[in-house]
Image (cartoon, grey):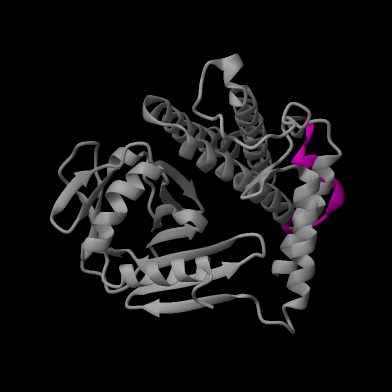
Amino acid sequence: MRKQTLFRCVVFLALLSMQPSVKAYDALEACRSSFQLTDEIHDCLDNYLDLMDQNLGDLTVFIDGELQGSERAAFNRAQNSFYSYRRENCLWYLEIGGPLVLAEQVAKNCLAKMSQNRLAELQALIAGYNDPAETGADALTNLPDATIDETAGEPILITPEGVQSADEAAAALQASAQETGASDTEEDKGLSAFLGEWQVNCTDAGSSKRCTLDVPLLAQGSASSDSIMRISRRPNERTTVELRFADHTVASPELIEWRVDNYTFGPVPGSIVKLEDNTTRQIINEVKFLRDDLLPLFRSGSEVGVVLLDEPEGSTGEPFQATLLGFSRALTFADGYITGDLQ
């Protein structure tokens, strides 16, 4: 299954690299011309949407991490509004698109086109801030160089090595597919461990090591849950904290109230909220807040609590909690793997 998905992504990237602009690419037309069965057309559209969402997500997290203060808050409000409007606008097509089997395809194509436009807009944002002498801004001056004006609209990937174009991403996926083919006989690099309730999974992609630290996020009175809290750790102690609420829809970060033990500090300003596959994701990646505030609280605390508020600044909602017992050991394990001290 993984090889098939990688192959389809390679095909899509190859198709997109031949287009003068992604905004001119009609995913529905391409999928209908390549496949006959309804399920195959939907799989084709889903693969394309996954690719677009991956690139949008990477750009969003990257830009969000570079901005500060009011600029960062405004960008996050804009992104949250975009995801909400994209969802509602394209769901509307289901009501007017005729037979459901056709309306669903039209709705997915709507998602694709809106994603294309937003991706091109964010690429233009990066290009506009790349030269502080012209813009007078310094928020994005450390963004990697790329010929963005020549590839406006093409899907790109943000990696530790910089911005990858469609051709480079296709080559990377092809190499990954070849490695996947060999994985039947060779064990993948990586380490995993359970430290209390924390599950640590570390991988080595060759160019960058990465560890994820997962712990169940339990609703009050529940013994199990599909919701999790995830900490992603990369070289140089780059960290992202994420909450994933399964089967929950949350409109904005203002509806997620945080506490560590008895210290309640409310919503996290500037965090990103996204809805994917009926799961709400809250992503926190502001470097200073994580380094100086949240992670020290995690190291010294015993429990994280969050409440999905019924309304902003309200006092009622659905509570969740995750244990912090074992977190320090899990983080030490992850950092040891990343630095090479643990093999």
Task: Look at the image and tell me whether residue 72 can be seen.
Answer: yes
Question: Quick one: 312 or 129, which is closer to the camera?
Answer: 129
Which residue corresponds to the image point at 45% horizontal and 35% vertical from the top-left? 80
20 to the left or right of 283: right
Residue 92 lies within the magenta run: no
278 to the left or right of 123: left
Q: How far across and how far down the image is residue 291, in percent?
A: 34, 49
Image height of 186 relative to 160, above or below: below
50 to the left or right of 289: right
Image quadrant of residue 158?
top right
Considering the whole magenta stretch, tell me its main secondary structure. helix
Q: How far across and how far down the image is residue 286, in percent?
A: 40, 42
Task: Look at the image and tell me whether residue 31 can be seen.
Answer: no
Which residue corresponds to the image point at 43% horizontal and 50% vertical from the top-left? 281
Outermost residue toward the bottom in this view? 185
Q: How far across and how far down the image is residue 90, in percent?
A: 58, 36
Image height of 39 relative to 226, above or below: above
Quadrant in which the N terminus is drawn: bottom right
Residues shaded magenta: 24-39
